[in-house]
Each structure stands twice: as structure tokens, then as C-alpha cells.
Image (spheres, rainbow, N blue to C red):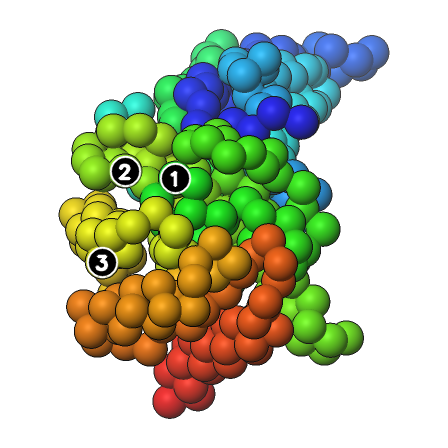
Amino acid sequence: MKFLDQAKIYLRSGDGGNGVVAFRREKFMEFGGPDGGDGGRGGDIIFVAAQNLNTLIDFRYTQHFRAPKGGNGAGSDRTGAGATDIVIQVPIGTQVIAEDKEILLVDLDEPGKRVVLCRGGDGGHGNAHFKSSTNRAPRKSTPGYPGEERWVWLRLKLIADVGLVGLPNAGKSTFLSVVSAARPKIADYPFTTLHPQLGVVRLSHSQEFVIADIPGLIRGAHEGAGLGDRFLGHVERCAVLLHLVDGAAGNVVRAWRTVREELRAYGGGLADKPELLVLNKSDAMTPREAASRRAALAKASGQEVMLLSGATQDNLPAVLRELMTRVHAARSVPAALELA
């Protein structure tokens, strides 16, 4: 299935049905009163966050959604039928944004969350509604109210516990493939990953977390360079960042700083998220190179640096245990705030 994280669609809720002019006509009832019914309500446009979806690809082919019009009223005070609603299912983490790409209308960040974005128009009034003590036979009715229409952007931001970041070819896809059932494309050249990948890491029956691999970042990614501009948003919701640095590429401090600068420039609180810094590809370094580069990275970052080989899985259990610990700590903070 192709991955699509952004789409523009047109929405229009249904117009209300028209009210009618009608009079009661029965045998022995020469001057029956007005009995024109009201129109029915137009259909709504409703968005629902669905658990079984992870891409917006369906909206590449279906871009216009129009709810039906409500039924017209009828004689004998019969109200028109209400129109059926249009229910649009989107992946969890989808944001609905106004056409100007600035105003956030809806954030569907919870499973089953349901939001009415465009309300159907109310039905018009039949002439029975206008009967009064001074006007016993009104010949007035009103049309249904129009529905709402708008163009909106759908933007998907994946919801994961851990976000994988790093320069292209840092070994992020290899790491994801060995710790989960995800099968991303892996090759020895930059930008092998062209769209985000999700994987579930299970350490035990009760311990698991979701990890997201995004395309590698390059300098200027926050401004649209490379593939990072579109996909940095997918790690906005992550609790912890796993920053992989290619230890075999040479200047590890420069590589780390490049990614950190992009996270800071992008905003959205990415630079403030807890970061686990890992020097990857230890199998491609001599013990002396691994020690010196690890020390240089620890001095520049001011934090502990873990050593890892995604290819040989050396030290992988320790990295996963540390990730699980940090995910638990990040999850407990919102819970503590709610209890307070």
C-alpha cells in the first residue's frame, strides 16, 4: 500500500429540505386549515479516527464529498426525511486544516474520535408553521437552509512512542527491521526510505512500544530540503527520540549537530524531547575508533552515548531496555499531571 500523508479534499454538507404549502382537504371539511410539513435536515460531514488505517491514499482518488439534501415536507403535517450523513474514516493522528494551511480545525488523535466538521442545513418551514389567530390560511413556506462547504487539507502525523532520527544511511531502517516485524527497504545508499514506517517492538508479553522510522534528514530539511520537511511532523507526537549516528561515516559530532539543528529549527518541541543517543555500526569500526568517536560524541552532546550494531545486533537488548525505560518515564508524566 502506498503511503500518503497529505491530501486536499472538498466537503459539502446537505441542504435542508423545503417546507411546503398544503391544506387539509377531507369530506365534510370544507375549510380545512394549513397542514404543510417542514423539510428534513441535510446530511452532515463527519470525520472518525479509525484504527485500521495508516495512510491517506484513498483521498488521492476520492476528493469530493457531498452529503445528500433533506427531503421536502408534505401535506398532513408530514416532515421530510432527514438525509444520511457522510462518515469519512481517517487514520489516527490525522489533522484537518483549513485551506490556508494555517488554522487547525480538528485533531483526530484518539481511536474512535468523532467530529462533525460540516453540519447539514435545517429544513424549511411548511405553511402550518405560520398559522396564527389572525392568519388562519397562510400560503407561506420557506426553503431549506443551505449546508456548509469548504476545502480542507488532511495531514497525517503518525502516533508512535519512539521516533527514529538521523542522517541518511545511518542504519534506521535496519534497526527497525531487526526489532520489529516491519520490513522497510534497506540498501547501502542515502534516501532508501522514502516514506515513514511503523513497527511494534515487543520486549515481553506486557512490554511493547511503537517506533516510527522517517526518511533521513539533511541540512536545511526544516525548510524543505531533501525529504525531511514533510516527515519531521511524524515525530512531533513521539515521546522519545532515538538518534542514530553512523559511526563508520567519520565526523560523528558534525552528524549529530546537523540533525539537532534541524530539529531545533523545525520547532514543535522536537528539540526538547528526551533523546537516546546511539552510535551505530560498531561492527564497521575498530575498538579504538569506536571508543574515541563515542567519547567525542558524549563530550559534544553532554549525555551518555550507547554503542550498537544494527547489522549484527550487538548490544541491541541493552538499547531496547533503555528505550523501554524512557518510554515508561515519558508515559508517566502525563498521567501524573492528570492526577495532580
Q: Which residue is mark 3?
A: 253
**Mark 2 in CB contact with mark 3 (< 8 angstroms):** no
Please state the horizontal and vertical placement of residue 299, each as a whole percent of the image. 20, 73
The disc label shown at residue 168, or none: 1
| Lower position in the chain sequence, tag 3 or tag 1 | 1
Q: Is residue 50 above or below residue 260?
A: above
Mark 1: amino acid:
Pro
Query: What element does badge 1 sit on?
Result: loop
Mark 2: amino acid:
Ile
The residue shown at (59%, 53%) is 311
| Separation of residues labelled 2 and 1 (CA atoms) | 7 Å
Q: Which residue is mark 2?
A: 218
The residue shown at (67%, 41%) is 183
The residue shown at (60%, 34%) is 185
Mark 3 neighbour class, 10 Å CA radius: few under 14, some 14 to 19, many 20 or more: some
Mark 1 neighbour class, 10 Å CA radius: few under 14, some 14 to 19, many 20 or more: many
